[in-house]
Image (cartoon, coloured by chain):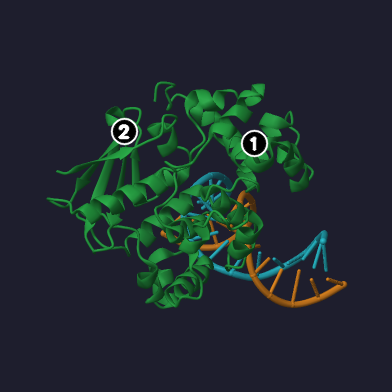
Chain colours: A green, B orange, C cyan
Amino acid sequence: MPTITLTTPPDFRFWPTAVSHGWCDLLPYQCDENSRTLTRIERLTDGKVVKLTMHNADFKPGALPIQVDGIQKLKPEQVAEIQRKISRALEIDRDLTVFHTLMQTNARYQWVERVGAGRMLASPTMWEDLVKTLFTTNTLWSATIQMCQRCVTLGEIYANGEHAFPTPERIAAMNLDNLNTHVRAGYRGAYLLELAQRIVNGEVDVESWRDPNIPSLELYKRIKSLKGFGDYAAGNMLRLMGHFDRLATDTVCREVYKTRINNGVPAVDDKEIAAYYEPFGAWRGLVQWMDVMQDYYHGPQFNRSD
DNA sequence: GCGTCCAGGTCTACC
DNA sequence: GGTAGACCTGGACGC
C-alpha cells in the first residue's frame, strides 16, 4: 500500500495532537489508544475513497508517515490533497512558540510544553468541524458520538461499512424528515440541513473563513449568524481555527474552573471565568482547553514519551 | 418493558 | 440587555 510522508515542524508531536480532544473518537476518525493509531476515511475530490492510517510508532521528529489504503498507486495531485488535508487536521503549520513560552512563565501550566500539548485535532474541512460542533451542543458526549456515527453513514462507503464524512451536497439533498430519521439529531436536524443548504447554494463560503486576515470578532459574528451556533459553539469553532482570544465555556469548563482553579467554588457566572483567563490575552481559549485536558495528559492513558 | 426525570446549549418571545 | 421556557435525545432510575 502507498505511504506518504508529511513533513512536520520540530515542535510537532503526533500523539498529543491526535488525542488533543474528543474529535479523535468521532467518525470518520478512529483512534486506538493501545496501538497509538489514528485512522480516517477520506473522500478525495476525484471521488476516490481512501483509508488513512497514522501510527505513533512510525512518527519521527520531522516526519509523519501516512498509510493510504484503497488505492494502488497515488497520483501527485492525490498525494498533495492528502498532505494538505492532514496538515490542516493536525495543525502542522500552527506556530506555538509564543504560547509555549507563555506557559513556561506560569507554574500552573509548565506541563503543557513538556507533554507536547497545544495543537488540536481538527477536520480537513470547516463543514465537518461545524457539523461536529453542532452535535456537541446541548447534549451529552455519548449522544454526540452517536449522532456523528449516524451522520457518517450518509457519507460515501469505503469498505466493510466504513464511510467518509458526508458532503454538504449529500445532506442538502435530503428532506428534514429523512435527515432526522437517519441522524436523530433532534431539533439540530433543521440547523444541520439549513447549514448544508446555505453552503451548497453559495450563500456562505465557510472555507474562506480560514483567511488569517479575518479578525476574530468578525469570524465570531459569522459563526453566530449560523442557526444553532451560540457563544460556546462559536468559541469552539474559533479554537479549531487557531483563534484563541475567545473562550468556549461549557459545563465541562465550568466544572474545571470550579475544581482546578477556584478551590471547589463554582463561578458566579461566566464573566468570572472570563476574568480568570483574560490575562492570557490572545491565547486564553487555548489555556482554557489545557485546563480541561490536564487530567488526561497526566493520566494513565497518556505517556510522557508519546 | 415502560414511564419519568434530568443534562446539555441555543433560540424565541417577552419584559 | 436579561430571563423563562421550549427544543430533542440518551441515559439513569424506579416500578
Give the image location of residue B2, x and y in percent. 48, 62
The one of A166 and A73 positioned closer to us in this rendering: A73
Question: Can marks 2 and 1 be said to lie on one chain?
Answer: yes
Instruction: Single out the mark in the foreground, 2 or 1.
Output: 2
The one of A108 and A281 positioned closer to us in this rendering: A281
What's the chain of the residue with tag 1? A
Residue A161 visible in the current orientation: no
Going by the numbered disc 2, the residue's amino acid type is Ala
Q: Quadrant of residue A163?
A: bottom left
Residue at (27, 63) in percent of width and height: A156
What's the chain of the residue with tag 2? A
The one of A119 and A157 positioned closer to us in this rendering: A119
Badge 2 marks a residue whose secondary structure is strand
Badge 1 marks a residue whose secondary structure is helix
A108 on left or right of A196: right
Q: Residue furthest front?
A: A213
Q: Which mark is residue A77?
A: none
Give the image location of residue A77, x and y in percent. 24, 56
* 2 or 1: tag closer to the N-terminus: 2
Q: Distance from label 2 to label 1 (Cα)?
A: 35 Å
A59 on left or right of A193: left
Residue A180 visible in the current orientation: yes
Give the image location of residue A146, x and y in percent. 42, 54
Residue at (29, 28) in percent of width and height: A57
Name the residue that disc number 1 marks.
A256
Q: In this rendering, is residue A292 above or below A239? A: above
Going by the numbered disc 1, the residue's amino acid type is Val
Name the residue that disc number 2 marks.
A63
* Badge 2 density bin: few <14, some 14–19, many ≥20, Cα 10 Å: some
